Amino acid sequence: MRILRSLTSCYTGGARLATDWLGPTVLLLMRIWVALAFWRAGVVKFDDPYGTLGLFSSLYQVPLLSPAVAAALGTWIELITPWLLGLGLAGRATALFLFVYNIIAVVSYSGLWPHGLWPGLIGSDFNDHKVWAIMLLAVIAWGPGALSIDRLLNRFWPKPATSSKAS
């Protein structure tokens, strides 16, 4: 019985350590990983605006937007939102926005899925985008974590008043 209590104690101690330290660290690393990927893409677009416009005119098929608007919007989205995600500012909203943006990027550029969208979804096409999507879903589900500006602001943000009326 003593061994079982000792094992249970070790397990709960490890789980507490994972929750308190490992979880926030992993969420931070996922946010930074995805932020860097989008930031790099934005820098490439910013460095060559004419090439970017050419890509949006010929390869990327963004629905509802002209190639010039899509190129400018895509560039600035990829330069601004990574900072919000990396810092954990409006973390869930930014992750949700980038999740949808990632889907639009995959659908708009058929060169990512040479075997077709649905076979590529299950197969080995656009793996980076799949990994980014999973990481963004983790941030959407659990928030940006303890190592974020959101958590810092939460300490100073006024809490909503709760009403406890007795009938």
Image (tube, rainbow, N blue to C red):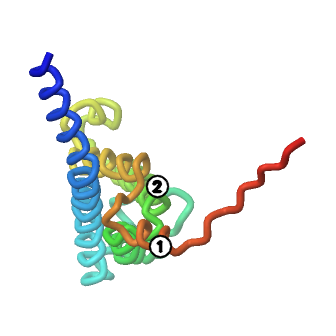
Q: Residue at x 25, y 84 (%)?
A: 47
| Furthest residue in direction left, as rendered | 3
Note whether 51 is above or below 21 in the view shown.
below
Going by the numbered disc 2, the residue's amino acid type is: Leu
Horizontal and vertical percent for residue 63? 51, 56
Note whether 50 is above or below 74 in the view shown.
below
Q: Earlier in the sequence, mark 2 or mark 1?
A: 2
| Structural crowding at the residue carrying mark 1, measured as other residues with C-alpha within 10 Å and reported as few (<14), some (14–19) or many (≥20) | few
Note whether 140 is above or below 120 in the view shown.
below
Asked which secondary structure carries label 1, the reply is helix
Foreground: 58 or 94? 94
| Structural crowding at the residue carrying mark 2, measured as other residues with C-alpha within 10 Å and reported as few (<14), some (14–19) or many (≥20) | some
| Furthest residue in direction right, as rendered | 167
Q: Is residue 71 visible?
A: no
Horizontal and vertical percent for residue 27? 28, 55
Foreground: 107 or 131? 131
Q: Residue at x 46, y 55 (%)?
A: 96
Q: What residue is pinned by disc 1? A: 153
Where residue 53 sits, quadrant-wise, is bottom left
- Quadrant in the picture for the C terminus: top right
Q: Is residue 130 visible?
A: yes
- Quadrant in the picture for the N terminus: top left
Horizontal and vertical percent for residue 146? 34, 61
Q: What residue is pinned by disc 2? A: 96
Horizontal and vertical percent for residue 121? 30, 35
The reply to whether dot 2 and dot 1 touch (C-beta < 8 Å) is no
Q: CA distance from mark 2 to mark 1?
A: 20 Å
Asked which secondary structure carries label 2, the reply is helix
Q: Residue at x 38, y 47 (%)?
A: 137
Going by the numbered disc 1, the residue's amino acid type is: Leu
